[in-house]
Image (spheres, rainbow, N blue to C red):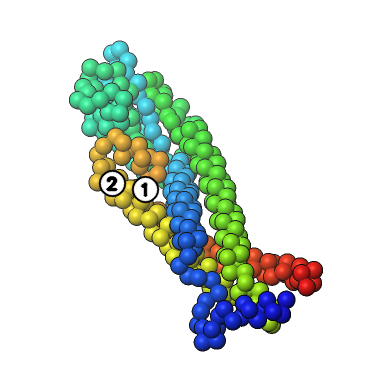
Amino acid sequence: MIDRLLTLLRLRPASDARSAPIVPPGNVAGRALLTVIAIMTFLASLTVGAVTLVSDTAAQWQSQIAREVTVQVRPDEGLDMADALRKVQVTALATPGILSADVLDDAATNRLLEPWLGQGLDLDDLPVPRLVVIAIDEDNPPDFAALGRTIREAVPQASLDDHRAWVSRLVSMAHATVLTGVAILALVLVATVLTVVFATRGAMTGNRHIIEVLHFVGARGSFIAAEFQRHFLKLGLIGALAGGAVALVVFFLFGRWTAANQATPEADQISALFGSFAIGWTGYGGVLLLIVLIGLLTAITSRITVIRQLAAIDMLSPVEA
């Protein structure tokens, strides 16, 4: 064993003992790990951004329940639609807790129907219900049941919709989506940890003779682990920055596209689901925190793996001797 150690020591010149790193900085395994970390961070950043978007949208949906209700007036034979809409407005405005009551004009109604019926609709020729949007005082909301009865008494063809049923379903779906996103994020982080473990073991195997020499001549395990930790921290941060930056660019481009195409039905549907598709400072902060987390996770995982491998070497060394 002593002869083997002396032979291995002579392979490293004394002048390079302090300057040469234990882990080669530019090997193929390191570049592959950097790419994997970048991909994992990209997927994790997309998940963080999507969870932020869905969570913010769910909060907006819940807030809209308290801010706004609609009255639908169905067309009927002999019904004067304009007079019916005016009666609904007057009835609503006379109710305490109502801030405003606005009739949805022809242009807005056409935009709502455009994805299904196309452009150039003539509402006078179609039996299309008309809507009155009623703004609610959140601090002093009205009695919705009483308001609905009063509106039906004034206009039998009218019905009040407070959106609670479908919005509650959408909010439940959004919460389920958030939980799914958190689970996906956890799986991505676990996969990253496992990748770093295998990469660290591969790096130790490729440099086993150097590690054994340093370890058997008295180098502390913490020193060797720190060398690997420094190397993998650099790889983790570079890969995480690359993946996170690409994800932020994707969100930025989608936000710009949504803002530039607000008049199209496709953008309207995306805005209804995800708002302006802007993740905001919460999303950006989450992605930056994720980048730091992945970098630290890579370094800590590498350090723990090295320490365990050195402990395994200590257990096998008496047998080899």
- Residue on which the image places disc 2: 257
Q: Quadrant of the N terminus?
A: bottom right
| Near-viewer residue (45 or 87) | 45
Q: Which amino acid does label 1 sit on?
A: Phe
Q: Residue furthest top?
A: 77
Q: Can residue 236 be seen by looking at this rendering?
A: yes
Residue sitting at x 31%, y 25% = 116
How far from the left and from the top, in percent, is residue 272?
Answer: 37, 40
State the CA–CA distance, disc 2 to disc 1: 9 Å
Side of 289 where 91 appears, left or right: left
How far from the left and from the top, in percent, is residue 221?
Answer: 67, 76
- Residue on which the image places disc 1: 277
Q: Can residue 41 be seen by looking at this rendering?
A: no
Side of 216 where 13 appears, left or right: left
Image quadrant where residue 319 sits: bottom right
Judge the density around disc 2: few (<14), some (14-19), many (≥20) Cα neighbours within 10 Å. Answer: some
Side of 170 where 318 appears, left or right: right
79 shown above or below 86: above
109 shown above or below 294: above
Residue sitting at x 45%, y 43% = 61
Query: Pointer 2 and pointer 1: residues touching (CB < 8 Å)?
Result: yes
Judge the density around disc 1: few (<14), some (14-19), many (≥20) Cα neighbours within 10 Å. Answer: many
Residue sitting at x 48%, y 65% = 27
Q: Which amino acid does label 2 sit on?
A: Trp
